[in-house]
Amino acid sequence: MAKTIAIPEQCPMDVGLNILSGKWKLRILWHISRKPIRFNELQRSIGNITTKTLTQQLRELEEQKIVLRTVYPEMPLRVEYSLTALGQSIQPILKALCDWGTSYQKATSSVS
């Protein structure tokens, strides 16, 4: 039987990786970090993601207090996704990752 690790005993890197793991979460967070965004616009921006997968990933990020889902009482119903205050703390990490990706692309394209 597996031993359950209490959260305070977990490595902080494991906590971060657990929250951000998966193919889509970093892409979702990147688009949401730029501005509040509606579901369909987010799905179009990301590209090849199914409605079911996007919904599931957004729900997980909501449960983890990273993403805020705001429902506006209008007809037709309008829902926007944005970062919570806690979620905004990941913006420097997303920017650093983007900057690193840009540097990597330049470094590898000049090597060829």
Image: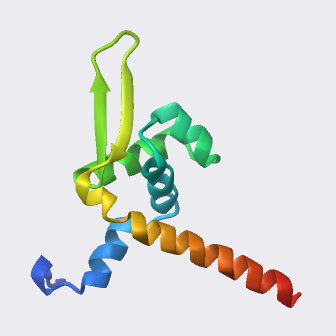
In screen coordinates, is 53 left or right of 88?
Answer: right
Q: Position of residue 21 (x, y in %)?
A: 42, 68
Q: How many marks?
A: 0
Which residue occupies 32% across, 74% down? 16
Which residue occupies 31% across, 83% down? 13
Q: Position of residue 47 (x, y in %)?
A: 64, 46
Q: Position of residue 68 (x, y in %)?
A: 28, 43
Residue 12 visible from this viewpoint: yes
Which residue occupies 14% across, 82% down? 5
Q: Which image quadrant: the C terminus?
A: bottom right
Q: Quadrant of residue 98?
A: bottom right
Q: Does 87 sit above or below residue 96?
A: above
Q: Nearer the viewer, residue 99 or 43?
A: 99
In screen coordinates, is 25 left or right of 61?
Answer: right
Q: Does 73 sit above or below residue 90?
A: above
Q: Position of residue 109 (x, y in %)?
A: 82, 81
Q: Does 55 sit above or below residue 3?
A: above
Which residue occupies 41% across, 69% down? 92
In screen coordinates, is 109 left or right of 13?
Answer: right
Q: Which image quadrant: the N terminus?
A: bottom left
Residue with the most extreme right position: 112
Residue with the most extreme top position: 75
In screen coordinates, is 14 left or right of 51?
Answer: left
Q: Nearer the viewer, residue 96 or 44?
A: 96
